[in-house]
Amino acid sequence: MHYEGIIKKYSRYLPVSGKTPVITLNEGNTPLIFSGYLSGLLGAGFEVYLKYEGLNPTGSFKDRGMTLAISKACEEGSKAVMCASTGNTSASAAAYSAKAGIKCIVLIPNGSIALGKLSQAMIHGATVLAIEGNFDEALKLAREITSEFPITLVNSLNPYRIEGQKTGSFEICDCLGDAPDFHIIPVGNAGNITAYWKGYKEYKQAGKSTALPKMLGFQAQGAAPIVKGHPIKHPKTIATAIKIGNPASWAQAEAARDESGGLINMVTDKQIIEAYKILAEKEGIFAEPASCASVAGLIKLSKTGYFSKRKAKKPTRITCILTGHGLKDPDRAIKSVKMPKVIKPKLKLILKEIGY
Ligand code: F0G
């Protein structure tokens, strides 16, 4: 059967009806990739899987929520949408708005979003305003404007975003045959951890899975308000996607952590870049830095013995969400490696360089 996106696939779990116009780019259905290298780090009895959300149409998990948010905005007759964004939400909102033929306005923190994401919002024809301020300030403004004018807010405060994004959990359960034991995920504005937890609970209630995972969320150390217990006025991290000091879904993230018996912890930029390079060099997977907070978290916890305490007969299964594609932020990739050597076009010189 031709795959046509998450709304068609999971309509019985979503707030849609026959009247909902389905605005889709065939998002979702992303691969769950077994990681031999990371499983090996944990040792016998552990299986680590990577949910490569960078393979969504605009290169991030945001498309799952955006297909529903834009479809519902159209159903409700909205002609314009707005979001504040560290980049991926704006890329997705711009693409789905283009498909729907409605206006899209995005507020981004000036100088703090990766080049690939900015190019996406612009090429899809969104009105892009770079705010002289951070994400939290941009989101406050977007909330104020959309509460006064006939513009639909498509940040994850829009409940349809969460509804769409919960389909990530459904896919993981469908793929593994049940829920994993642990679910590791980067945390920024905290919408995605909220969505995945909702999805796992609903799938279990529907009889499609028998268990619930422990939810393990990871923030960047310089932008870790939930870990520190207070908003961060000037968040700092190279993982610009999660450079957020006052997450909108803070309480829901804590609920996911507490109800599941999990944790929310943090990783340094150095640990994020280490994970970024491991994924690229050992697994052939290019994920943007913020994505790699999940794998950095896995490695951090594995060193503390967090996972080895379990004594189960079945393998312990861990899923790490890789939220966005590495091509979103080519500058970071180039900064993390050696630049290619420039060489004269001579056969002998090349053979010498490559050791033949
Ligand atoms: N990873 C990536 C690649 C992201 O773009 C985001 C959020 C997150 C993780 C964190 O997800 O906010 O649901 O906790 N990006 C938003 C944006 C804020 O504007 O694109 P979250």
Image: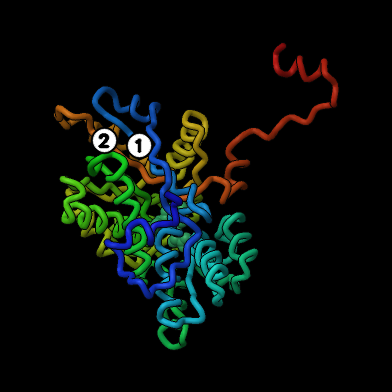
Q: Are marks 1 and 2 in contact (CB under 8 Å)?
A: yes
Crowd class of label 2 (few under 14; some 14 to 19; many from 20; radius 10 Å): some
Q: Can residue 22 be spotted in the picture?
A: yes
Q: Amino acid at mark 2?
A: Arg
Q: Quadrant of ligand 1?
A: bottom left
Q: Residue at x 44, y 52 (%)?
A: 3
> Where 254 sits versus 280, above or below?
below
Picture quadrant of residue 18:
bottom left
Q: Which mark is residue 49?
A: 1
Position of residue 185 measured from the top left corner of the image (x, y, whole percent): 34, 48
> In the image, 205: left or right of 108?
left
The residue sitting at 58% across, 47% down in the picture is 327
Tag 1 secondary structure: strand
Q: Position of residue 98 (x, y in %)?
A: 57, 69
Which disc is residue 63 wearing? none
Give the residue at the far front of this rendering. Answer: 1
Q: Which of the image's four quarters has the C terminus?
A: top right
As drawn, 229 above or below 34? below
Q: Viewer-proximal residue, 168 or 155? A: 168
- Residue underneath mark 2: 317
* 102 w.r.t. 23: above or below: below
